[in-house]
Image (spheres, helix red, strand yellow):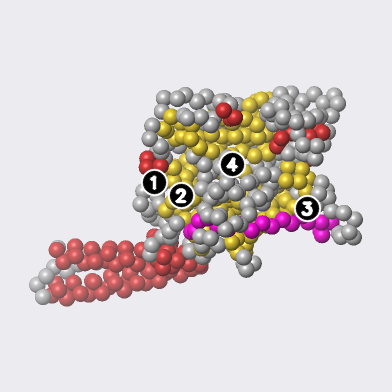
Amino acid sequence: MENSKQGWLLLVEILLILNLPYSLAFGGNENKINTAVFLSPKFVLGPGSVENRFYYNVDFPRGHIALKSFNAEVIDEAGNPVPLHETYLHHWVVDRYFVREGVEMSEFDDHARLNRSDYISGRNSGICQDGSIGQFFGLGSETRKTATHIPDPYGIEISNPAEIPSGFEEQWMLNVHAIDTRGAEDRLGCTECRCDLYNVTVDEYGRPLRPDYKGGLLCCYDRTRCKVKQGFGGVRRTLYLRYTVKWVDMDSSVLPVKVYIFDITDTWKRTRTSTGINAEHHCKVEYDIEPCRETGLTDDGCIDSRRISLDMPFGGYLIYGVAHQHSGGTGSALYREDGQVMCSSSPTYGDGEEPGNEAGYIVGMTTCYPQPGAIEISKGETLILESNYSSIRHHTGVMGLFYILVADQLPKPMHTLHTVNQIQDSITPVAILEAVVAMIGVVAVIAVAIHYRFKRGGEDGYEAIGM
């Protein structure tokens, strides 16, 4: 009987060895992904009205974890997704901060009064400064059809005890900027925050606007109202931002990535004393597109293309990239100085009425997921950011942001993971069927060999394996 057991154990071991590449290819050893769905505090909008508030200490996963994705959309009280042509989601952003233990922060604390001794920003890794664009995640109208997942074995590490200042705790802030365009006299003008449509001449702090400022965030702040058609009688309704967070527990199998955001309006300039991330990065966040003049160009030729060069104050491996643009955008890209495309991101426009396919709106941005190790950024390297918009008509308050995730290290051993990636890319139903048939054949041959071996052993006085 002992030899019988040994024979079957040998067969099991062989099967496990044969199955190992397939187990690796299908990710059988991944960390468990946790998922939670939350709601923002409610906000109430009527035709033409604007919500642009900062909600502090919002619901968020706790503990030392690695974020894998963050998705969001506007819903009504019944949980139904709201289309963009009714409520335009200008943007939502998620920021991290640290608050002194024992200090209570309400959901609606004044954003302008947070620079005090009991509050520390936990912003991303750069590169914009002066308090701008510090979010970990952020999208707008494109939110429903833009991938945000971070591939294994990577994740955004949060709540690392070593990174939380002594005497402070980590919390999260959510900013939602939504515009109700039901009955709007000029729906696109409302979404682009044209000042004349909002009848605004001062910003939210009462400061006069520049005479040449025609539209943008300074004109569509919280509780302003865009012009609606006379006599339009839409009702006020309660809405929420529903957001879904996915994460894994942080352990040695997860490689952390850092969040960097580039802005086409960055006025950073190269100087001899420029080192690292510093105050020279002034990101204006938004800009205007002037209409193309009478040049004889066709509509397809009216493109406003902007480029800036940026010296990288960091190095690492590009894991993910995506752009953020507004209506009129035609795509954005990140290049090396020699013109090599590192990552490009293009908009998808809707052509229907249903949520996620609204005609005339950007409903998604393509993303890039380079193979691990395929794109390395060297510290000090000069990269080129490009943002393109249609200039057939005038656009105000557009954006040209580019998010990237960068890892300091690669998985080891790289050749094993590369082989696994190749296996995943090449697996087809036919290949799987062929592999199964081949494995059955191998198992049959091994079984016959074991049977023959132990049958002969039985003739020599040992018990044979029964078949």
Q: Is residue 420 located in the magenta-colored stretch of the structure? A: no
Measuring from the top left, give residue 83's x and y in whole percent. Answer: 70, 37
Q: How far is disc 4 from disc 1 in space, using C-alphas? A: 31 Å
CA gap between label 3 and label 2 equals 35 Å
Say few, some or many: other residues with alpha carbon within 10 Å of mark 2 (under 14 / 14 to 19 / 20 or more): many
Amino acid carrying label 3: it is: Ser
Q: Quadrant of the C terminus?
A: bottom left
Residue 322 horizontal side relative to residue 457, left or right: right
Q: Report the residue marked by disc 4.
A: 130
Circle 3/circle 2 CB separation < 8 Å: no
Q: Nearer the viewer, mark 4 or mark 2?
A: 4
* Label 4 vs label 3, nearer the camera: 4
Residue kind at label 4, given as amino acid type = Asp
Q: Which residues are magenta?
A: 299-316
* Residue with the mark numbered 3: 390
Q: Earlier in the sequence, mark 3 or mark 1?
A: 1
The residue beneath circle 1 is 250
The amino acid sitting under disc 1 is: Met
